[in-house]
Image (spheres, helix red, strand yellow):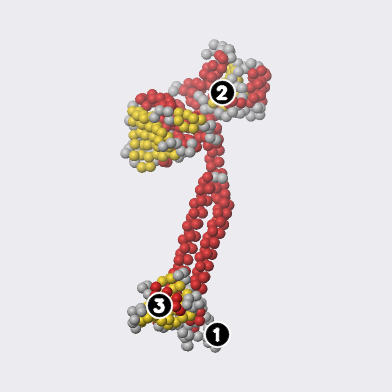
Amino acid sequence: MKILLASSDRDLLECYKILLEADLGQTVTAFDGTQVLSLLSSEAFDTAVLDDELPRIEFGKLINQAHEKNIPVIALTNGADTGQTQADAYLKYPFDYDKIKRTLIKTLSDAGKEDGNE
Amino acid sequence: MNKAEKKFRIYAILVIFVLLTVLLAVINAVNFTMAADDADRLTQSIAERQGSFERIENAPEEFRFDPKNKDFRMGPMGPDSPEMNASLRYFTVAFSDKGEKAETVAFNISAVTEEDAKEWAKELLKEKTGWTRGTYRYRVYKKNGTTYVTVIDQGRELLPSYRILIISAVGEALCLAIAWFLLLIIGRKIYAPIEEADRKQKNFITNANKEFRIPLTVISGNTELAERKYGPDDQTRSTRRQLLKLNELVEKLKTIGIYEDENGKLSEISLSDHLKIALEAKAGAFSEKGIELITDIEPDVKLQADPAAIKQTFDELCDNAVKYSITRASFKLKNENGHVLIEASNDADLPDGPADQVFDRFTTLNNAKDKENGAGLGLSYVKETVKAHKGRASAEVKDGDFIIRITL
């Protein structure tokens, strides 16, 4: 399993990368929209966990790009405008690790990508 | 326009109105009293001259014009002035033989005939002194067995007083109009910063709500990491407990922020059902803490209200009861005179007295028995909701019971 984790907060990336890699699989991090786009086009991911306010690129465009590659998107959100984007799942800050893990597993199984790593 | 600003203007104008009215009333009352006093002194000096005020041949020193004395000044004419007789409109009737025989001692008035003067004087015989028929001042006095009645016309003397009275009334109206206009400008100046502060506070709440969320997520993740590395201990458990509190606080901040921005959609809902559901959800928590729950909920109490806000309000009230009750909590809901009354009470270790401060943000009552204090936002949300539904909420401690009363 390969996860793309994107947030503009590097502390968040650092600690959740360690946790997700320990439990679920390889986790690649990005801290702005440009990075997400280039990672999406250059690497294959099973799922993308993206903050919905990433700098530089509009969130809708990132979702479209991921969906084109058949990658389900989990949106990390502050609670505003959840209805306007087409993410596959939403995770509202503040969440704990258990919640992000459960959401990831559920999203992957919904998308038929469960790979038995968990 | 801001409601508080309007209130301020009405109170300010009321204060100005009362002050001006008192001031002008005192000025006019003193003025008329002094006029009456002057008239009395005049009738007194007529009385001293046996009812007739003839020309005084030798005016007292201070009233005598002296061409050599360049410092001589004549002041306003008082009742003692020797010139008084020239401008005096009056008559005096003398009654002898126990009032049988009437005779005019002095008569210098146009409005009255001598015959009428005698009739009039007879009417006044039993009196002492005072005003009669508008601006006439009279005095009844006895000298050598004869009773005299002197009536003087003070119409001209009172004219300035009446003018001042009218000017006062018009002036006051004008002052109030100007004050109202100035208050419009000043009110804006005073309230603009207050509104700005209010807006900033709301902004802060919205921002704080947002800005807290990611750090909380990071702290939570790092706590998880620390527990994996070193195993869970008291410190990580305490961090998790504090995180829970902060998460709860952030959720409440969010609801407050939203609620202040706009009113929710109203629809007719059953308050009874909402309260029952809220209480059922907390039934476990109540029994776990050994709190006896007493309910008296009238069925089918309906209200046009915002369902989400009402749900949250009832949740907060139940939350509060779970947190702060010692042995028992009670909820009442009923319809009375077209209003909905909600009463939530619980036993508490608190001194008696009003406790409306619980509705302020970040305020909790100091409860020595329970260290599990909340953030102090729940009841402020309750108050906001009640206010938005045009209701009233009050809180007090009575006979050791903490009681919240809501009228909707």
Residue B292 visible? The answer is yes
Task: Please state which amino acid type lies under the numbered disc 2.
Answer: Tyr
Residue B362 visible? The answer is no
Q: Determine which residue is flagged by label 2.
A: A90
Q: Determine which residue is flagged by label 1.
A: B70
Q: Secondary structure at mark 2?
A: strand
Q: Is residue B169 above or below residue B399?
A: below
The x and y percentages for residue B352 are 34, 41
Circles 3 and 1 on the same chain: yes
Tell which subunit mark 1 falls on: B
Q: Secondary structure at mark 1?
A: loop
Q: Is residue B141 above or below residue B253?
A: below
> Callout 3: 10 Å neighbours few (<14), some, many (20+)?
many
The residue sitting at 32% across, 37% down in the picture is B400
Q: Quadrant of residue B407?
A: top left
Work out how far the residue at label 1 is from the one at label 2, CA to CA, in angstroms: 103 Å
In this rendering, would B271 be left or right of B143? right
Task: Please state which amino acid type lies under the numbered disc 3.
Answer: Val
Q: Determine which residue is flagged by label 3.
A: B149
The residue sitting at 61% across, 24% down in the picture is A85
> Callout 1: 10 Å neighbours few (<14), some, many (20+)?
few
Q: Residue furthest top?
A: A116
